[in-house]
Image (spheres, coloured by chain):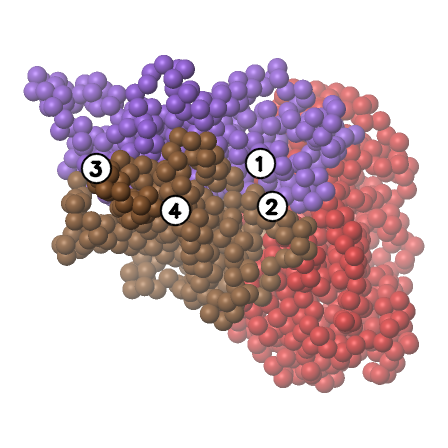
Amino acid sequence: MLAYLTQRLAVGAVSLFGVAVAVFLIMRVIPGDAAVMLSGAGGGVVSEQELQDVRHKLGLDRPLPVQFADWAAKVAVLQLGTSLRTGNRVIDDAARRFPYTLQIVVMAMVLAVVGGIPLGVLSAYRAGSWLDQGLRLVSIGGLAAPSFWIGLIIILGLIWLFEWSAPLVWEPFWVSPLQSLSQLVWPALAVGFRQLALIARMTRSMMLEVLGEDYVRTARAKGVAEASVVLRHGLQNALLPVVTVIGFEFSALFGGLIVTESVFSVPGLGQYVVDSILNRDYPAAQGIVLILASFVVVSNVTVDMMYGWLDPRVRVQDA
Amino acid sequence: MRSHAGLTSVYTDTVGADVETVDGRGGSQSRLGRMTRAQPLGAVGAVILLTMVVIAVAAPVVAPFDPTLGDPAALYAPPGPPYWLGTDAFGRDIASRLIYGARVSLLIGLGTSLLGVAVGAALGTVAAYRGQWTDSIIQRAMDALLAFPMLLLALAMATMLGPSIENVIVSLAVPIVPRAARVVRSSVLVLRSTPFVEASRAIGCGDMRIIVRHIVPNTLAPLLVIATAYLGLAIVQEAALDYLGAGIQEPQASWGLMLSGSATSLALTAPWIVIFPGLAICLAVLAANLVGDAIRDLLDPRLRRDY
Amino acid sequence: MDTAGFRLTRRDVLRTTGSLLTAATLGWPTRAAAQAAAPKRGGTLRVSNGGDPPDFDIQQTATYLTQFLAAPCYSTLMREDVSDPTRVVPELIERWDIAADGRTVTLHVRKDVAFHNGDVLTAEDVKYNLDRIRVPPKGIVSPRKGQLANIESVEVRGPLTAIVHLKQPQPDFLFLISNPFNGIYPKKVVEPLDQTGQGMKRQIVGTGPFRLARATEGQIYELVRNEKYWGPAPYLDRMQFFPIKGEVERAAALQGKRVDGCFFFASESVLQSLAKVPGMVTLRRPNPIFINLIPNVTKKPFDDPRVREALSLAIDREAFIKTVGPLAGAFYHSLGLMPPKSPYSLTAAEVKQFSGYDTLPGLGGNIAANRQKAIALLEQAGVPKGFKIVIPTRGDVPAFRDSAINVSSQLKLVGLDATVDVRDAGAFYQLETKGDFQIVMHSVAIAGAQPDQILGEGYTSFGGRNYGGWKNEALDDLYRAQSAELDAKKRVEAVRQFQLAFLKTYNQVNLAWVGYAAAHASTLHGWVPMTDLYNNMQMSRVWLST
């Protein structure tokens, strides 16, 4: 197990290095550099000499490999550098923004689990019925609408129906829980629908599989109450893969909020990374992408480890 | 055989892929009528999608107006004759823009999923078949791409390449590659050790021949399912790219583009400008997913084990 | 507060001395309507800005995001009169003398003005700031350096006296230093920061009625009352700025009473929906921001004046205004190059002699005939039918994006195959800075409406807005001649000559002027929307009723 963990982490580190190279290159190839943005070029023609001066101050006139080595060396000791746009350490900006994104992710997942699992069970239990078809339609529908579109409709709906808009002063959940909930439940709804759909469908298919197993038939034959058959024998055994999905979705959501956060003006990581890309804020964009990528890597390893641990039938294998 | 790598691959996307659907009643019916009865939703999806494709192909014939030239005398016209779905801020007929937009959006959906899945499948097959160093290198590259948040990768690529249909297709396809590669790689690993492949090798067939004759046909089913899922995802993500300002060039129409730019601020006084393109996206993605579900159930019950 | 304060008109500049009555009578002119009720002290004004300010250096910036936030914290040497935008009033100077040759301006700095950090304002600060704007230190960018390019040197004579030597007489000079972006920094703070290339991007230290108390990027920017303010004490306790990018989202915050005001909207649709909300005040004002079609004269075939003339002929300005107006606020038009209703405007007859300008609203032009002429001109110039034109634009500003979309479809009608290349701001700047484009549709926002501002910045070969890369010594000489003209009547004529000469070149084709919209709760009082967006953040007289 330990050897496997070490191996997985080593592989993860290699992936992260790949991400680092990729994000560094992409950021440098995107037309329009940090100097152009920092010079507020919208105010008039900025001469090439002025831009060179700014680049020199930022060290952007050095050869790319030198810049990369410089950055990578700092990242290796967990120094993400200073944002060109905000002037703060990237890690501080990220830490301040992380709770909001985390909260949306958690709320979206809670919503998805609380709604998705019962729907999936119901759907499987009535497999093939019109109820099943209807639920499937709704759950596929959850994957179909662009989240910014849903977001806009939520915002307009709240204002038209209740003349209410979310508070603008942001405090973390632990400072003012109610206000925080009232701000973040909307983006959570906008993205959570999709997770709900995924979980409902996963639950449905696993339930169908499990309900067909011999031990479920045996339980039924023994006259165990139907609810108990479905929930104890069925759901309990179907749940493991569902938990896996939840794990993967959890890490993926962090990078999936970039549009939704901007629609709801949430000061989260997603909006930060988009602003960083648009402003050619190299240290910030690169740093946050690395952070998001490491979430994915760590959670994948965790889920894999958990999976092997929870279900001894499954042999851990990395073919 | 349950592969963890396969699991990871499917669940690291973020916006709308749904390749995991399993229908317990997957069977081997082959008659169209029985298929329709077994998969009524899938049939509905197929009809919707086909209709959209036909309309898109026949756009110049079907569209009542030029999608790029506005009527300055009919800005913000509400739905009604002759503009049945209304006009936008530039006086352009929304129905015609939806019809021409179907070309762009469906092309992006199809192009993206085909490109992403094809490249991914090629890499996955090579990786699984060659093994060793080739496999390791491809695997690590795919890992890195997988760890990159999907939409973010597409956004960065699209900003880098500049706006055009081809660039959007490439940008959106890149995140699909590792996901498709993972799925294909695990199926090929299974196939490689199956008796018929081993038999082919025993009678001296070359690698290429084995891949083309035996491996590829046997991975088509999972690929088709992934492709339909990513078709819908690509349409939604193209809209997100347009929203973030890195999509298609005006005055070309795409459904996503019709929702971006000034459109959102017009939702307040001319809601038809955003409602119809939004509905078009929903309908197309819904249809694609329904078809994907049905294909999965009909073609390959084995897939339920791989999600 | 019943005096109108000291005002300066352009003609006043011709007198050699400006002076001030007493400090007690200084202040902003009364505004009967705004002060009908007794102002209430206290309260927090919550406003929404369209995003995070990229930085706080008001002298280096060109965006309203920074200007709106920083302007209440800074004072300028002089500033535009709230009641009459054709006048400027002294602010950090008490008075000035202009020598008989018109080239030496003596600025007498106000006594006992303290910066937020306690430092006292001196003539050294004035010199440093003027020099910083006109010849910025290495690594500092000054978008308005051209506006102060006529300064030859600034000399400090005593702690409160600065003498500005001009290259040639310049009646607009005092208007140029009152530019609302020219907030005055303390030299002791800014000089070392300039050495690092950072400048004042990360802090605000000014002499204005408010000071920055808190800045949390992505969330809130809070200003509090400057208790040591040199002028009349501000009414508000604090101002909070919330960055919200979408106009609809901003309108929702306003309607949901999360903010009290939003001082810059573009979309008419948003404004109209807010106008229906009870207790909401909405308005739209013209603004000295213009939208021009700018051909790149260094690229074929746009080096050919016939092609540029054809572009002008191809655009139905009335249709453009009707379409882009509601999206970007481009509802206005003017005769000639100066802003609408400027004393320097040309006559309709003068404007109509230039191709395409007869389609301005009310001038009775025939667009169909114009387009025929355009097609003929293009043919003469050897531009093939279906010639491809790509118009790069930035996707985040309607004045750029939607103008480009409209123009591209109009150009199609004269046989040009025009498409719009929507980029993010960074990529667009890059294309534009490098001159890597055929045509751009450009909204040009210059604070100020004097000829030296509009023409100097927008229409000279050395001006900051010469994106098209043209060169024309004769035009530049005409500009310099009008700039130095002290006689008001002769100045009008000189500006007229310049405009006529410029319009003939079609180096830039003016299409429309932009106005801004604003909305605020009726509990907000004393805020005066001026005819220049950037002068709107004069917040010391603003108060809130409950």
Image quadrant occupied by the N terminus of chain B: top left
User: Type of residue at label 3?
Assistant: Asp
Q: Looking at the rendered structure, which numbered label has been put on residue A153?
A: 2
- Quarter assignment of residue A284: bottom left
User: Type of residue at label 4?
Assistant: Ile
Do tag 3 and tag 2 residues touch (Cβ < 8 Å)? Answer: no
* 3D distance between C-alphas at marks 3 and 4: 23 Å
Q: Colour of chain A?
A: brown
Say which element carries label 1. helix
- From the top left corner, tell me how far across and down residue C249 is, in percent: 63, 53
Q: Which one is in front in this view, the residue at disc 3 or the one at disc 2? A: 3
- From the top left corner, tell me how far across and down residue B180 is, in percent: 31, 34
* 3D distance between C-alphas at marks 3 and 2: 47 Å
Q: Chain of mark 4?
A: A
Answer left or right for A140 relative to B31. Answer: right
In the image, the chain rendered in red is: C
- From the top left corner, tell me how far across and down residue C29 is, in percent: 86, 71
Question: Which residue in the structure is indicated by mark 1?
Answer: B278
Q: Is residue C375 visible?
A: yes
C108 lies above or below C480: below
Q: Residue at x 56, y 48 (%)?
A: A151
- From the top left corner, tell me how far across and down residue A73 is, in percent: 30, 60
Q: Chain of mark 3?
A: A
In the image, the chain rendered in purple is: B
Q: Residue furthest front?
A: A223
User: Type of residue at label 1?
Assistant: Gly
